[in-house]
Amino acid sequence: MQKVASLPLPPADALDASAALTTCIGDAIEAAGGWIGFDRYMALALYAPRLGYYSGGAAKFGRDARDGSDFITAPELTPFFARTLARQFAPLIAMDLPRVLEFGAGTGRLAADLLLGLETEGALPETYQIVELSGELRVRQQETLAARAPHLAGRVQWLDELPAQFEGVIVGNEVLDAMPVRLFARLGGRWHERGVALADGKFTFEDRPLADNAIPDALRALPGDHDMVTETHAEAEGFTRAVGAMLTRGAAFFIDYGFPAAEYYHPQRAEGTLMCHYRHHAHPDPFLYPGLQDITAHVNFSGIAEAAVDAGLSVAGFASQARFLMNAGITELLMELDPTDARAFLPHANAVQKLLSEAEMGELFKVIVLTRGLDDALPLAGFARGDRVHAL
Ligand SMILES: C[S@@+](CC[C@H](N)C(=O)[O-])C[C@H]1O[C@@H](n2cnc3c(N)ncnc32)[C@H](O)[C@@H]1O
């Protein structure tokens, strides 16, 4: 197992769990003849039962490394994120769509604050369903709901798998980026798949040349012949098709960091977008402490849009997070606080600034909405200005 001197050392029990996961992934590599695709490595590192990052006991979400966490997400930063989503969801729920379904609900903050926001908007859904892969997170979600919104917790149900059919509003914040990706490297003008092998008992990248007919379409046409590394997202696209097959009527909102394909596969982005998060340090080494750090890649929103259209959905809006939140009324909501009460106002104002700032989450994060069976006059205030569907 690799160590990095500048990063905090995990506690002994976490190191033991990481060693067990390392053995499990090593066995998978040997069973596969010495090499696995990076998507398989990422799936095991994040989701192997009990030991993967999301299936195991890591703290994951939080404000800083002192609480043992690795990163913070928008719903954890401020309830104004969820309250703004509630403003956007309320008129949809009023269109006889009284159900919400959330994918990958993290600590349960979004669920709790969204339900509270919808209550304020007079648009409480009859049910709020959560699809969560991690048993540990499900318990945390139940605790958060009991603490923050006890009178609404009875509306929440946990599902073990996607329902066959769903009518209502779907939401997933930072879920698509947590889905396994394949890695590819163009070296000396030739495409290779970058997978994981073992060298001296340690994980290492190993590139295997691809036959012409095995090069993914998204990469085949990329201009230039300079060396580059990038990713493809079959899992996130398959997930989008599954959402499309399930959604009989309603709207699905996915919020995440990423770009349209032209930007994602721009020749200047030659190092790909794979990124790991450990104790609030972002770094590029996916082999550090397997199971104890998050591994992510940015989302190719054009691929998500294409998969959605394949499944019969419409792409009803695509905007930067800043545009979406401002259009949907985040600043008006913030102004409900008393700005002269600095102690109450400033922490929220700072968090909202982080959500909106171009230099932080405002431009890198995007919101896409996929719909079925809703007419053209949709109440989608979040996309009223700055809609970029044309860029997908
Ligand atoms: C980065 S966390 C985001 C958590 C939360 N939404 C937030 O914003 O704080 C990613 C979450 O996506 C979940 N996830 C990944 N793939 C999923 C899938 N196919 N279905 C449901 N949840 C999934 C993970 O288990 C994890 O809870």
Image (spheres, rainbow, N blue to C red):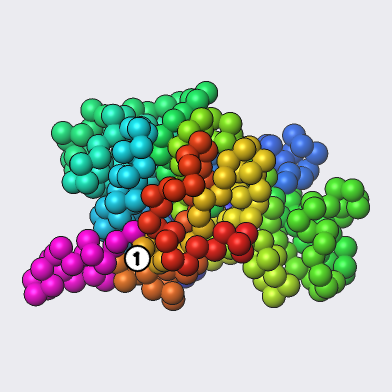
Q: Is residue 84 above or below residue 96?
A: below
Q: Residue furthest left?
A: 341
Residue at 52% over, 23% down: 164
Does the magenta-highlighted stretch encompass residue 178?
A: no
The majority secondary structure of the magenta stretch comes to helix
Nearer to us in this view, 119 or 28: 119
Task: Give the secondary structure at mark 1.
Answer: helix
> Horizontally, is 348 left or right of 49 in the view?
left
- Taking the image as drawn, is residue 297 in sight? no
> Horizontally, is 120 left or right of 20 in the view?
left
> Horizontally, is 126 left or right of 253 in the view?
left
Q: Is residue 338 above or below residue 32?
A: below
Residues drawn in magenta: 328-351
Residue at 76% over, 56% down: 218
Residue 384 image point, x, y percent: 42, 61
Residue 101 image point, x, y percent: 40, 35
Residue 323 image point, x, y percent: 41, 66
Q: Residue furthest right?
A: 212
* Residue at mark 1: 326
Nearer to us in this view, 349 or 19: 349
Residue at 10% over, 68% down: 338
Q: Is residue 76 above or below residue 130?
A: below
Does the magenta-highlighted stretch encompass residue 346?
A: yes
Q: Amino acid at mark 1?
A: Met
For the C terminus, give its image quadrant: bottom right
- Taking the image as drawn, is residue 190 in sight? yes
Residue 85 image point, x, y percent: 33, 51
> Horizontally, is 217 left or right of 59 in the view?
right
